Image: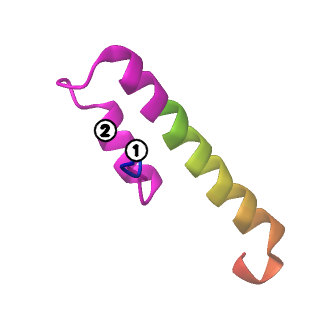
Amino acid sequence: MEKPYIAADAAECKRRAEDPQTPTDERLVWAQLAVAAELRMIRRVLSNPARR
């Protein structure tokens, strides 16, 4: 069984979401993943006072 592709970061998810050759439903999923990755980064920074 082939392993699914895993994006490395929010920027990569965003690039895939903006790719016009990707089907629309798949682009929506990549856009949601990009937002989730950005929110995770924000949450991580806010939870660690040393990074502020």
Query: Mark 2 — residue?
Result: 16
State the count of labels: 2
Left or right position of 49 against 30: right
Image quarter of the C terminus: bottom right
The residue furthest bottom is 50
Judging depth in this view, the residue of 2 and 29 nearest the camera is: 2
Q: Are marks 2 and 1 in contact (CB under 8 Å)?
A: yes
Neighbor class of circle 2 (other Cα within 10 Å; few <14, some 14-19, many 20+) is many
Disc 2 residue type?
Answer: Arg
- Residue numbers of the magenta segment: 5-30
Point out residue 38 in the picture as x, y percentages from the top left corner: 57, 50
Seen from the viewer's position, the closer of residues 4 and 22 is 4
Q: Position of residue 29 (x, y in %)?
A: 48, 28
Where does the image place residue 32, in percent across and percent down from the top left?
A: 54, 32
Magenta-colored stretch includes residue 29: yes
Q: Quadrant of residue 36?
A: top right
What amino acid type should be assigned to the residue bearing mark 1? Answer: Cys
Check disc 2 and report its element: helix, strand or loop. Answer: helix
**In the rendered structure, does residue 15 fall within the stretch colored magenta?**
yes
Distance, label 2 to label 1, CA atoms, is 5 Å
- Quadrant in which residue 18 is drawn: top left
Up/down of 29 relative to 48, above or below: above
Percent across and percent down for residue 12 are 35, 51
Identify the residue at horizontal 38%, vertical 41% (top origin). 14
Q: Residue at x 20, y 24 (%)?
A: 20
- Report whether 47 appears left or right of 2: right
In the displayed orientation, state which residue is furthest to the top: 24
Q: Which mark is residue 13?
A: 1
